[in-house]
Structures are given as structure tokens and as C-alpha cells.
Image: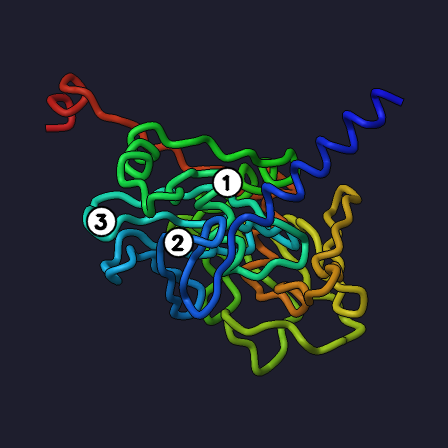
Amino acid sequence: MRKGMIIFFAVLGICFSAQNFKTKRGIISLDGIHVAKISNKSSVYTFMDLKETPIYTIEFIDKSIVDSVRDSYIRLNRVYNRDKTIDLDYISPSAFSGEEKSAVYTSIKDLKIIDNKGVNIKNLDDIFKNIPKRKLDTKTKDAYSTRSKIDKLNIEVNKVGEILSNGVPVGYFTNLPVSFGSEDTITDKTFVDIEVYDAKSKYIGRYITTTKQIKTANGKIFTIYREMSGRAALLKFPTYKAIAERMAIMDPNFIKIQEKVSVGPVEKQAAQ
């Protein structure tokens, strides 16, 4: 019974502490006292003191990392010192809270840069001195790791379907449509699969247009389009570049990162 009462009052305390702030008509109140103001333009929220002097901004970022994995976070920026911006996690009072409420809630409860005296400049500056680490789940970390590998390859597809990595030809597409464009999305469902070969004409794999699947020569399969809850995936119709990038991840032997070889003084002298 005693344990149950403790849990009850703990939950009650959380509920009350989560309800002691309010935002109405751009005015932020704590326990009924006006402490700051807020305005927004798109997903950027500007926090001001009661004299409407801008002090810092919070921008909401939601981006695709790779495939259907997305990352949502905020970007904090000081109006009086824009030399550095920092990316941070944010918290919301509920799953149904909008951006404004989440921005205010994060400022008060997590970052503690708004208190009953207004905007706390000291706490704001301390965040930039000791930047909190983001708490990414395993799926998001893996996606960033994959994105980093893809970016290093710097893959491009030219107007004739040739695949280049850092400017070097590494492969090509076959069975391309007559109206092919390197930045086009593949929307046609054809019974002839789009195939990928390396620079030595070795078969690497194919994209199956009817199922939106990539299948490598060694049997690996990846569905490039996956339905996401409440939102359509960005790669519903992939570009040729996206297919080449995914093929490179599925078959590491297809495209390897070009290592830059440093030339020392002895080699330079010999060359001369």
C-alpha cells in the first residue's frame, strides 16, 4: 500500500511539474507569471525577453539519413553570438505536442534556460561551453555510419548511365529507358530489370522495378521502398544514384574508397 502511494504521488508530482508552464499569444508563463516571449517563422522559434529582445533560437530539424531512417532534433543558436550552433535532442510534454510547445518545454525542463526570472543567459552560455551529447539509438547510429561510408564514395551517375566515384568510372547501368536522366526517379514498372555492372563488366546486381527491390549477384536483397507510419518514404521512387549507393553498401567490393597516397621528399626527388 505504501509503495503504491509513493508511485501515485510521484506520478502526480510529474503531472503538476509538467503543467506549470503556459504559452499563449506568444507569451511564456511559469506558474502564472510572464517570463519570456516566443515567435516563429516556419520551424525556427525565436525566444525573447519581455521587452521583445531576441536572445536565442531553436530550429526543428527532421531529415532522412539513409533509406527510411530519419533523425529529428533541434538546432540551438544564440542571437548575440552566432559563431557556433549546436544540435541537441529535445523533449515534449506529450506525444501530441507541437513544435512550439516542445521548444518551450525543452527550454524549461531540459536545458533550463528559461526560469521564473526569465531567460537565463548564464545557463544558455554554459550549454555552448559543455555541449550535451545526443542520445541516438542503435538504428540511427548505424544509419549515420552507412551515410558516412556513402558520402566518402561521392557517387555520381552521368547522362549516359555511367557510375563514377570521386570522379573515377567504376561501373554502369544497363536496360535504361530511352528518356533516361541521371537525376530521374525510376517510376516505370517494367519487366526488364535495370542492371548494374562494374567497370570491368562484371555483373553486380539489379533493381527490380515491379517490387522496388535491389538484388546483388551474391543473393542479397533490399527493398528500397518501405512504408513508414504516418509518412510516405522519401525513396518511394529512387534515383539511379540512390540505387548505385545502396549497391555499393550491399557489395563492398563494387566500389572501394580511393585512398590518397602521400608522396614523401625521396619520391618527389626521384620523380624529378
Local packing at callout 3 (Cα closer than 10 Å; few below 14, some 14-19, many 20+) is few
**Label 1 secondary element:** helix
Q: CA distance from mark 1 to mark 3?
A: 24 Å
Relative depth, front residue between 263 and 189 = 189
Residue 262 against residue 14 in the figure, above or below = above
Displayed quadrant of residue 36: bottom left
Residue appearing at x 83%, y 21% in the figure: 3
In this image, 97 relative to 77: left or right? right
Q: Is residue 235 visible?
A: yes
Relative depth, front residue between 150 and 25 = 25
Q: Which residue is mark 1?
A: 109
**Label 2 secondary element:** strand
Residue appearing at x 44%, y 46% in the figure: 107
Single out the residue that lies furthest toward the top. Answer: 266
> Residue 83's x, y, as percent?
21, 45
Q: Which residue is mark 3?
A: 82
